[in-house]
C-alpha cells in the first residue's frame, strides 16, 4: 500500500530531519521535492498547492525557527497536514431511526460495489446489526447471482426479484422484506456503467428519492488515481453522497486518489478495501493512514485486528499448556491459523513500522502460511504431539504428502523449535496478563518471521 509514495517521501523527510538550522531556502528546496513526489503519485494539482502552502506557512513560524530540533518539528507539521488532507477524523457510518436503515452503494462498473456491499454486510453483522443485501444491479450479467453467492458465504439474505427490470421497485420491495423479517439494515447494490451517463444517474437518483437512504457511499477503485477523483466529483454533484469507499487500496502504490478525493469533494473516506476476501475491509482512520504513508506503520490497527481475530478460549488453553511447559505442533498450527485469519501478509506487514521499506522490491509469498499448514497437517497425531520422533524417513513422507520439498519441511520444524524455545522461556505471569488484556498469544510478533 502506497509503497512508491512512502519510499520517496521518506527520502525527503530524512533530509529535513538532518537540517540543523531551518531557513526559507531549505524549506523551499524540501517542498519542491515533496511537490515532485506528490505529482508523481497523481495527486490533484490544486490539492498539492494548498497542502504545500500550509506546510510552508507553519514551517516558517517562530516556534519552528527557534526549536532545538526544527527538522523534526517540520516532519510533524507535514504529518499533521497529511492527516487533515485525508480527513482529520474518522467518519462513522450513519444510521437512521427508521427500520430498516438504508445504505446505498453507487459508482462505476468495475469499482467493486458488489463485493464491497457484501464486505459491509459482514462488517455490520459483526457489529450486531441484521443486514439484508438488495440486488439492484439489473444490467450487469451475473451481478445478482454474484451477490447471492457472496451473501451465502457470510450468511446474509439477498433480496432480488427474478426478471424484474425496475430497480426502484426492487428497492421498495426490499424495504418491505426487511420489515417483515425484522432486519434493521438494508444495503442496496446499484448498477454502474463503464462511464457516467444520464441513464445511470437518473436511475440512482430515482432510487435515492424513493427509499431516502440514511447513507450513500460512493465506491471507487483507488488505483485509477485522478480518474477516481473526477468521477467522485461528478457523482457528488448529482447525488450529494455521504462518504467515499476506496477499493483495491492494497494494490495502490501511488496514493493519488486517497490524498486528493477528500479535499476535492469535501466528503470523508469511510472505508478502504484491502483485498479480495470478504474480511479485507478497514475503517478509514486518517491519522493511521498518514502514518503508513510516512513509513511509521499502523500498530494500533495491527493490534485491533489481532484482538478481533484471536480466540480467547484458545489463548486460555494455551496458557494452561504453557504452565505445564508443553507446546506441540497442534499448538503451532493453531497459531498459524490465527495469523491467517488476520488477513494477507502484505496488509499485515504494511502496519508494522519499517516493514515496507525493508521489503521494498521483494516478493512476499502469500502462500507461506498455507504451505506450513499443509506440512503440519501431513503429520500423524503422534508426530504432532512428539516432534522428537521426526527422523529423515518421516520427514520425507511428510514432504511427499504435503507436496513440498524436504527442505521446506525442515524449515517448518526449525520454526517450530525456535518458537518452542521462546514459549518455554516466557514468563508465565506476563503471558497471563497479556492474554487476558489483549487476547494475544505470547511472543506474537515473533510469529511473523516466516
Image (cartoon, rainbow, N blue to C red):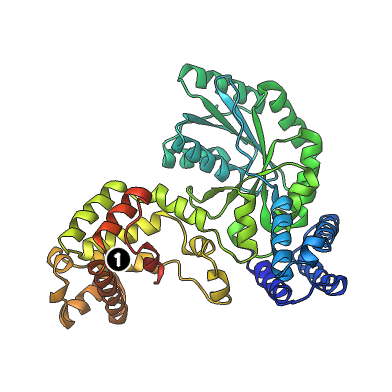
Q: Is residue 189 visible?
A: yes
Instruction: Give left or right: position of 336 versus 11.
Output: left
Viewer-closest of 163 and 332: 332
> Which residue is at 59% across, 64% downward?
296
Give x and y (percent) for residue 216: 67, 34
> Which residue is at 72% across, 70% downward?
71
Give x and y (percent) for residue 221: 66, 52
Mark 1 packing: few (<14 Cα in 10 Å), some, or many (20+)?
Answer: some
Eyeballing the image, is 76 above or below 143?
Answer: below
Viewer-closest of 7 and 407: 7
Q: Is residue 252 visible?
A: no
Viewer-closest of 248 and 157: 248
Image quarter (top left, top right, bottom left or bottom right) of the C terminus = bottom left
Name the image quarter holding residue 105.
Answer: top right
Q: How many marks?
A: 1
Instruction: Give left or right: position of 320 versus 263.
Output: left
Eyeballing the image, is 311 above or below 186?
Answer: below
Name the image quarter holding residue 224.
Answer: bottom right
Image quarter (top left, top right, bottom left or bottom right) of the N terminus = bottom right
Q: Tag 1's secondary structure? A: helix
Give x and y (percent) for residue 60: 84, 63
Eyeballing the image, is 119 above or below 83?
Answer: above
Give x and y (percent) for residue 342: 43, 55
Name the image quarter holding residue 192.
Answer: top right
Q: Which residue is mark 1?
A: 374
> Which residue is at 40% across, 65% downward?
445
Amino acid at each position: 500500500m502506497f509503497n512508491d509514495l512512502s519510499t520517496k517521501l521518506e527520502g525527503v523527510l530524512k533530509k529535513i530531519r538532518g537540517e540543523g538550522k531551518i531557513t526559507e531556502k531549505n524549506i523551499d528546496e524540501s517542498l519542491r521535492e515533496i511537490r515532485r513526489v506528490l505529482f508523481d503519485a497523481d495527486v490533484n494539482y490544486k490539492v498539492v498547492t494548498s497542502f504545500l502552502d500550509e506546510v510552508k506557512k507553519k514551517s516558517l513560524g517562530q516556534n519552528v525557527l527557534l526549536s532545538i530540533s526544527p527538522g523534526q518539528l517540520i516532519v510533524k507539521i507535514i504529518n499533521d497536514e497529511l492527516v487533515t488532507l485525508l480527513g482529520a477524523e474518522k467518519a462513522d457510518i450513519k444510521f437512521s431511526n427508521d427500520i430498516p436503515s438504508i445504505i446505498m452503494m453507487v459508482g462505476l462498473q468495475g469499482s467493486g460495489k458488489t463485493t464491497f456491499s457484501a464486505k459491509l454486510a459482514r462488517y455490520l453483522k459483526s457489529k450486531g446489526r441484521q443486514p439484508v443485501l438488495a440486488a439492484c444491479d439489473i444490467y450487469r450479467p451475473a451481478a445478482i447471482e454474484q451477490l447471492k453467492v457472496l451473501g451465502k458465504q457470510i450468511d446474509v439474505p439477498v433480496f432480488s426479484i427474478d426478471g424484474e427490470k425496475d430497480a426502484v421497485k426492487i428497492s421498495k420491495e426490499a424495504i418491505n422484506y426487511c420489515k417483515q423479517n425484522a432486519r434493521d439494515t438494508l444495503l442496496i447494490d446499484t448498477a454502474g456503467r463503464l462511464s457516467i451517463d444520464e441513464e445511470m444517474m437518473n436511475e440512482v437518483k430515482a432510487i435515492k428519492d424513493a427509499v431516502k437512504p440514511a447513507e450513500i457511499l460512493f465506491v471507487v477503485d483507488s488505483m485509477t488515481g485522478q480518474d477516481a477523483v473526477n468521477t467522485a466529483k461528478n457523482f457528488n454533484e448529482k447525488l450529494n453522497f455521504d462518504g467515499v469507499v476506496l477499493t483495491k487500496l492494497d494494490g495502490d502504490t501511488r496514493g493519488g486518489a486517497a490524498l486528493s478525493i477528500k479535499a476535492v469533494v469535501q466528503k470523508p473516506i469511510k472505508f478502504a478495501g484491502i483485498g479480495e476476501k470478504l474480511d479485507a475491509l478497514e475503517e478509514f482512520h486518517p491519522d493511521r493512514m498518514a502514518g503508513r504513508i510516512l513509513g511509521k506503520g499502523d500498530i494500533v490497527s495491527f493490534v485491533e485486528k489481532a484482538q478481533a481475530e484471536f480466540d480467547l478460549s484458545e489463548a486460555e488453553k494455551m496458557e494452561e499448556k504453557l504452565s505445564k511447559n508443553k507446546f506441540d505442533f497442534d499448538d503451532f498450527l493453531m497459531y498459524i491459523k490465527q495469523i491467517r485469519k488476520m488477513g494477507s501478509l502484505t496488509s499485515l506487514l504494511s502496519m508494522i513500522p519499517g516493514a515496507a521499506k525493508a521489503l521494498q522490491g521483494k516478493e512476499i509469498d502469500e502462500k507461506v502460511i498455507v504451505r506450513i499448514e499443509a506440512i503440519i497437517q501431513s503429520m500423524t497425531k503422534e508426530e504432532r504431539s512428539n516432534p522428537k520422533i521426526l527422523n529423515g524417513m518421516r520427514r520425507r513422507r511428510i514432504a511427499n504428502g504435503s507436496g513440498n520439498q524436504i527442505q521446506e519441511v525442515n524449515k517448518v520444524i526449525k520454526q517450530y523449535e525456535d518458537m518452542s524455545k521462546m514459549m518455554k522461556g516466557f514468563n508465565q505471569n506476563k503471558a497471563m496478563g497479556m492474554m487476558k488484556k489483549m487476547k494475544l498469544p505470547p511472543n506474537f510478533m515473533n510469529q511473523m518471521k516466516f
